[in-house]
Image (cartoon, grey):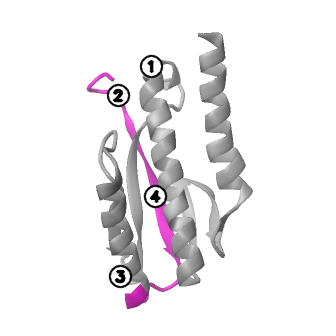
Amino acid sequence: MREDHPVDRLVVALAGDPTAPIVDMMLASAQRLADRRTWVISAPRFLDRSDDSGARWVGFGLQIYTALPPWGDEIDPQVDSAHLEEVKELVAEICRLSDEGGVSFQLEYANEFIGMVEAGRMDSGIAETLIGEWERAINRAKNSG
């Protein structure tokens, strides 16, 4: 990868008010994810933010080398595949958190809303649009190369 290749961020935000038990579960998940593998850029970080009105939100942030135009042709296919696996691992973890904690999460990639995880299940925006399209793009690249 080129040193100046742009980085986007996948942000997972808890929908609703963060309770202490949910925050504790999320902190433990962030540590589990960090320990589970070697991440391309860095492990997902736990995010704890407040806006100007004092409203608090928590979530995770994962940095990803962009494959959005015009950079898609320049991303190393192995890096692209590794990022997809990282995203799938993070989504699986938030599905588990959603199911066990009875909470919902929303996902944004490159500041665009992608979808929701509710009752432990990802919606079609995540399953088909984000992950499915990404898998199809990788498979097309493999088959044409």
- Let me know if residue 13 is in the magenta part: yes
Instruction: Report the residue that reaches farthest toward the left.
Output: 3
Q: Which amino acid does label 1 sit on?
A: Glu
Q: Which residue appears farthest toward the top when viewing the image?
A: 145
Can residue 46 be seen by looking at this rendering? no
The one nearer the camera, 33 or 58, is 33
Name the spot of residue 128 as percent of width and height, x first.
71, 47
Q: State the residue lying farthest toward the bottom.
A: 20
Q: Is mark 1 on a helix, strand or loop?
A: helix
Identify residue for label 3: 24
Relative depth, front residue between 33 and 5:
33
Alpha carbon distance from label 3 to label 1: 39 Å
Mark 4, other Cα within 10 Å: few <14 / some 14–19 / many ≥20: many
Mark 3 surroundings within 10 Å by alpha-carbon count, few (fewer than 14), some (14 through 19), many (20 or more): few
- Residue 90 location, x and y as percent? 47, 56
SS for tag 4? strand
State how far apart marks 3 and 2 are (Cα): 34 Å
Q: Is mark 3 on a helix, strand or loop?
A: helix
Gap between marks 3 and 4 measured at Cα: 18 Å
Residue type, label 3: Asp
Q: Mark 1 points at which residue?
A: 74
Q: What stretch is highlighted in magenta?
A: 1-21
Residue at numbered disc 4 = 11
Instruction: Identify which residue, 89 or 7, lies in the foreground.
Output: 89
Name the residue type under label 4.
Val
Residue at image coords 44%, 36%: 82
- In screen coordinates, is 1 left or right of 108? left
- Report, in whole angstroms, how far the alpha carbon at label 4 lies from the one at label 1: 23 Å
* Real-space CA distance between mark 4 and mark 2, rounded to the nearest whole angstrom: 19 Å
